[in-house]
Amino acid sequence: MGFWQAGRVWGPYAAVLGIFLLLGGSLECSCRPQQLGCYLHLLLPAAAAALLLLATDQCFQRLVRHLLSADRRHAGSFLRSCGGRVLRAAGVGLLWLVCVLVDGDWYVCCMNDHSEQQEKLACTSAGWKSPSRAERQHLFHQQLLEQEELALRETLGKLARQRLAEEFQLQMGGGRWEQCFDVAERLVKAAVQPAASRGGGASEGEELPPPGPADAALLGSE
């Protein structure tokens, strides 16, 4: 009897704990405004847990039946007892709200302003878990667009550094190390000036090397 009685007392609390664990990781942020789904995820499990505890509380049921009957004796005492049990069930339900807010995923998904910066933090929809072929292609194309500028800057920067290193070696190999301080400026001028007017830009009779593909990178870096 002791085991069954303990099961009747603690069984509902175990069921509520199971509900909390089951729903704890079920929030899927769609990267779009979803206020209704957010508030349902926050309030519905809490209300369900409180109602489950009250529905399985036999003492609460007896108190309610007495209050609804014609017998009004000790109604104030029964009402206080009934209110206490309602508050206890509500307190258990509020634990769900605390767990959701402490976890932080709900707040990031539902309380952002859907700007470009905050939307990226919240974008953890189910499409990442099992994307279709079309979704994979869309994600790939989106990544291509986002990485294009970074890859271009990195590639042009590598070419520009290579071009500068070659010119540094050329100047220092000829004993003109002081010319290294304005190599970038002279290379840019050599790249933008027409071939006919480029001959007079060199100092001390020095001829600049013909512009290479990396000169465009220097132009972009200015």
Image (cartoon, rainbow, N blue to C red):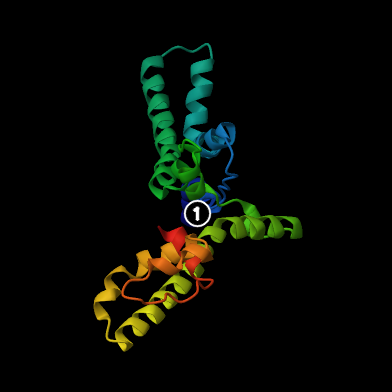
The answer to whether residue 171 is visible is yes
Q: Whole-percent x and y of residue 6?
A: 46, 52
Q: Whole-percent x and y of residue 109?
A: 50, 43
Q: Is residue 47 above or below residue 215?
A: above
Mark 1, residue position: 1
Of residues 45 and 184, the one drawn nearer to the viewer in this rendering: 184
Q: Residue at x 28, y 75 (%)?
A: 179
- Label count reads 1
Q: Residue at x 46, y 60 (%)?
A: 219
Of residues 198 and 130, the one drawn nearer to the viewer in this rendering: 198
Of residues 110 and 168, the one drawn nearer to the viewer in this rendering: 168
Left or right relative to 82: residue 120? right
Left or right relative to 175: residue 136? right
Q: Amino acid at mark 1?
A: Met
Furthest-left residue in this view:
178
The answer to whether residue 16 is visible is no
Q: Residue at x 52, y 65 (%)?
A: 196
SS for callout 1:
loop
Left or right relative to 52: residue 72? left
Q: Residues within 10 Å of mark 1 (few under 14, many from 20)?
A: few
Of residues 3 and 103, the one drawn nearer to the viewer in this rendering: 103
Q: Is residue 135 above or below residue 171?
A: above
Q: Whole-percent x and y of residue 4?
A: 52, 53
Picture quarter with the C terminus: bottom left
Tell me where residue 76 sits by quadrant: top left
